[in-house]
Image (cartoon, grey):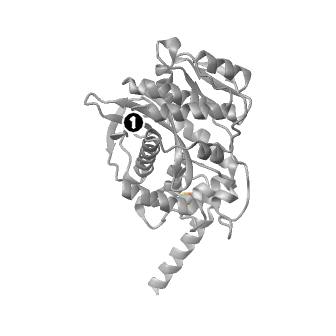
Amino acid sequence: MKSSLLPGSAAGLPYQRLTINPSLSNNRSTVALSIPDQSPMERFSKHHLNVTQLCEQSWCEIKVVYGFLKPHMKRREMRRTAVMTGASIHLARELEANPDAVNVVVHTREDREALKLINLIQMVPALEAGMLVREFPVLGVLDGVFFLGVVDELYCSKSGELVLSELKTRSHNSLPHPAQAKGHSLQVGVYKLLFDSMVQGSMKRDQLLHYLKLRPHQAFGSELQSYAQKLGLLAVTFGELVDHLLVVLHFCNLQPIDKLCLEYRHQSSGVLIGNREVEFKETQLRAELRDYLAFWRGEREPHGVDIEDIEEAWKCRMCPYEESCEWRRSRLQEVMVEGSKKAK
Ligand code: SF4
């Protein structure tokens, strides 16, 4: 396995940055959209969720299920989305902050997760010093489910507010409609919940090891060990690194995030389309989160797109599962039957 190290100190930055390649896709394939007595978490062997998974869910839950049932189509769509969502703009920004990249060989899942934690440990003091940090990992338990996420940007505004900013690129040179922006607002809101609980000391060692299914006594690979030593980290096992992270978070003086922003850029030109500030309504957000998690826990059936709602129906036309979607087919039949009844 190869992951990359972006040594910020080489670029005059006070922290070294590590990035990892996305992997660990779930290739299970079954037929039914839901299975009695088996929650989607169990069925798809999910021990934790990524925040972006929640955002996909806000788009269409049936689509999320198909993503697991038809992984080859999901992969094809992810490749297409990576182009459409301007992965190059994100990468350019990251390289702007950390121009030198060095590959690090990782041998275990513990090595891979350790890279994220090492980044995090270095970014905390940088953020405390008022620097802008990018790709800040956030993690923790919300409503009984462990989440992982990566915040695009955190920085202090001129007025001293801690600002979280998420970059979104668009193929159209216009701001998104509410149905498209819903997932974006959810994403930054959940990032804030995670970040705030981290800096308020809510993260627990046992939770992290338990939900991520990681071995605390697993020693790092030799290359990662030598990088950790260069950075002055004494940890040589994953558990020791977690302990170090918890101390860093406990003694840091970071405050909860004050402001949530979405920055929209035109995908092909990179030109700024506009910025939106997202209002943080914690009670409402937590209620929405509970409802989303009810799906993952198998407490309710998945919801598809409301094909009779003009604000929603267009989603299906962009969906790779449109032709085979059982939800859509049965809803179309219901609508036709209702229509013919009314006509009589
Ligand atoms: Fe969801 Fe529509 Fe795609 Fe079916 S076709 S998965 S309802 S977006």
Instruction: Please state, as top left, top right, bottom left or bottom right, where the N terminus lies in the image.
Output: top right
Ligand 1 falls in quadrant:
bottom right
Residue 21 is at least partly visible in this image? no
Q: Position of residue 17 (x, y in %)?
A: 54, 23
Identify the residue shown where x is 41% and y is 52%.
182
Q: Position of residue 162 (x, y in %)?
A: 34, 34
Which residue is denoted by mark 1 in the rendering?
Answer: 165
- In the image, 248 versus 122, the foreground residue is 248
Residue 301 sits above or below residue 83 on the image: below
Q: Quadrant of residue 75?
A: top right
- In the image, 339 versus 143, the foreground residue is 143
Identify the residue shown where x is 59% and y is 42%.
205
Going by the picture, which residue comes out furthest to the bottom? 344
What amino acid is found at the position of numbered circle 1 in the picture? Answer: Ser
Structural crowding at the residue carrying mark 1, measured as other residues with C-alpha within 10 Å and reported as few (<14), some (14–19) or many (≥20): many
Identify the residue shown where x is 33% and y is 40%.
259
Horizontal arrangement in the rendering, residue 161 relative to residue 185 (left or right): left
Horizontal arrangement in the rendering, residue 254 relative to residue 137 (left or right): left
